[in-house]
Image (cartoon, grey):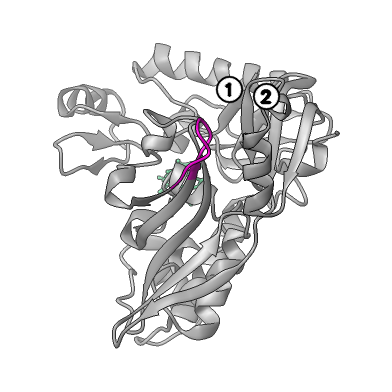
Amino acid sequence: MQLKALNTFGIAAIAQRFVPINTLADIHCFLTNPTFQQPLPLRILGGGSNVLFCTAQINGTILHNRLRGIEVVQQDAEYVWLRAASGENWHDLVQYALRHNWGGIENLSLIPGTVGAAPIQNIGAYGVELSHVLDKLSVIDLHDGQSQTLSAESCELGYRDSIFKRTAKDRYFITDITLRLSRRPQLQLQYGDIGRTLSDMGIGDKPTIQDVSAAVCRIRRSKLPDPKELGNAGSFFKNPEIDSQQYETLKTQFATMPAYPLPNGRVKIPAAWLIEQCQWRGRRQGDAGVHQNHALVLVNYGAATGSQLLALAQQIQTDIQQKMGITLQPEVNIWE
Ligand code: EPU
């Protein structure tokens, strides 16, 4: 099975074995027959928007998540609990909530990928992250086929982090998530670009969640390349956190360095700024490049291979380590 159309980098790669998952029964059927579960490893593919295929053949078995369905499971005067199957497109879910006037995820408009990927890296943008609205999720344990419900708390969501990247890595198939959305939304407008964009759009001082979504879409379209036009996976690296001592030292050298103080006393630095300072923005090696409008986005100009993009990422990491003493961690999952 050719995977080029199933990853937003547009990297050509062949799946050794490819299993479409359309229903929960497909997962149970797969897990109850041991002969199906070869070759290993088992990997789950959603929208392919946060993955880099680094080999021409992806070894093992890929389960392609195509689970569908959105429904209200509970409601009261304040909130609506909305359950969405993990194979639904994330932005479609945002639009569903907007159509019904339920607030909480409007700042997360236009994030590529599936609903099931959202908790894995606790998607976040413009001052909101999934952890603010996630109530619980359902999983099937790939070891014993048992269904379980996990509370949001037990998923230990952090900045682009959760148990699904650590202790529970590769253990579960997330089948659905339940969000608690608000009938009387508190708008999150503190992220600088949003207020500015709303006023550029001529929106007065009482924006709606639909206005906020439109502003977010406008910002994203102006900075981030559309994967349908230029292969990419959004931010390639996480924004690094450094301790305050290292920050003070670096500031004497780089006076304009932007920084966001964190409640734990550490400081978050925009990786895009570091990459730009090291002159990587807009650079290109063959068909692998660093996007001109946003230095955190690596792009495939056409025929780049995953290993070429990975080599570019590694050069950036080495450069920033040497010049700033900061280690950049990939945000994208590397499949080798
Ligand atoms: N900047 C530069 N050069 C650039 C771009 C940005 O110096 O080319 C600096 C500017 O100082 C800017 C700052 O970086 O103010 C932050 O840029 P931006 O607002 O675009 O946010 P980001 O930190 O680069 C993060 C998320 C994005 C999310 C935005 C908005 C991560 C790894 N990325 O990017 O998420 O959309 O904030 O909230 O945290 C993604 O995960 O794929 C993603 C796109």
Does residue 86 appear to the left or right of 72 in the view shown?
right
Q: Which residues are magenta?
A: 140-147
Look at the image and tell me in which quarter the C terminus lies: top right
Q: Position of residue 85 (x, y in %)?
A: 57, 60
Main secondary-structure element of the magenta-colored stretch: loop
Does residue 153 appear to the left or right of 202 in the view shown?
left
Q: Look at the numbered discs 2 and 1 and tell me whether their residues touch, using CB distance below 8 Å.
A: yes
Q: Position of residue 314 (x, y in %)?
A: 56, 17
Query: Residue 313: which disc?
Result: 1
Q: Classify residue 279 by image quadrant.
A: top right
Q: Position of residue 181 (x, y in %)?
A: 38, 73
Query: Residue 309: which disc?
Result: 2
Task: Please say if 50 is above or below 180.
Answer: above
Q: Residues within 10 Å of mark 2 (few under 14, many from 20)?
A: many
Q: Residue at x 63, y 22 (%)?
A: 41
User: Would you say the beta carbon of the disc 2 residue lies within 8 angstroms of ligand 1?
Assistant: no
Q: Position of residue 300 (x, y in %)?
A: 74, 34
Q: Residue at x 29, y 88 (%)?
A: 77
Q: Who is closer to the viewer here, 169 or 4?
A: 169
Q: Classify residue 299 by image quadrant.
A: top right
Callout 1: SS: helix
Q: Hey, what amino acid is under mark 2?
A: Leu
Look at the image and tell me in which quarter the N terminus lies: top right
Task: Please say if 309 is above or below 103.
Answer: above
Task: Please say if 300 is above or below 77.
Answer: above
Q: Who is closer to the viewer here, 160 or 278?
A: 160
